[in-house]
Image (spheres, rainbow, N blue to C red):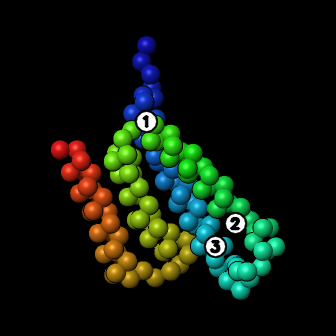
Amino acid sequence: MTHILTIKHSGILAALASVFCQSLAFIFMKTASRELAGDLFCLRYIIVNFNIWMIVIFVVLQSYFWQITLRKMKLVHAYFYTLLIYPALLLFSIFIFGENISLNNVIGTMLITLGLVFNYRLQNE
């Protein structure tokens, strides 16, 4: 009997779920920072803010999926999936928040991504 979801695939799925949850947490962080700009030190407002609760939920989920990922694969393999966060953040900036990105943002993202790819390839030789 063959298993549709192998151990390797479950590690990949957990890594992707971790990245997805972390990306969602970043979206809610940006939204919360816009809403709380003037009320940053009003503890009561922070406690009842929907975006703050979403950050907490997605960070907890991200850490849960990350622990599953680390159980299923080596750290160097798991860390490779985190490179998906950086281009996603640029896309979120443009399409969700309507921000302009600079050439420096693109170059920085490319350097981080290439560094992770380079490190991954070195570890797998």
* Callout 1 amino acid: Lys
The answer to the question of whether label 1 and label 3 lie on touching residues, with beta carbons closer than 8 A, is no
Please give the name of the residue rendered at 56% of the width and 65% of the height, measured from the top-left corner.
26
**First in residue order: circle 1 vs circle 3:** 3
* Callout 3 amino acid: Thr
Of labels 2 and 3, the one closer to you: 2
Q: Residue 31 carries which label?
A: 3
Q: Name the residue under label 1.
A: 72
* Callout 2 amino acid: Ile
Q: Name the residue under label 2.
A: 52
Task: Give coordinates of residue 69: x percent, y percent.
Answer: 46, 42
Task: Give coordinates of residue 83: x percent, y percent.
Answer: 38, 58
Please give the name of the residue rendered at 46% of the width and 46% of the height, measured from the top-left corner.
15
Is residue 17 among what the camera can see?
no
Farthest bottom residue in view: 38
> Element at badge 2?
helix
Task: Give coordinates of residue 71: x percent, y percent.
Answer: 46, 37
The answer to the question of whether label 2 and label 3 lie on touching residues, with beta carbons closer than 8 A, is no
Up-down relation of residue 105 to residue 13 (above or below): below
**Crowding at label 3, few (<14), some or many (≥20) Cα neighbours within 10 Å?**
some
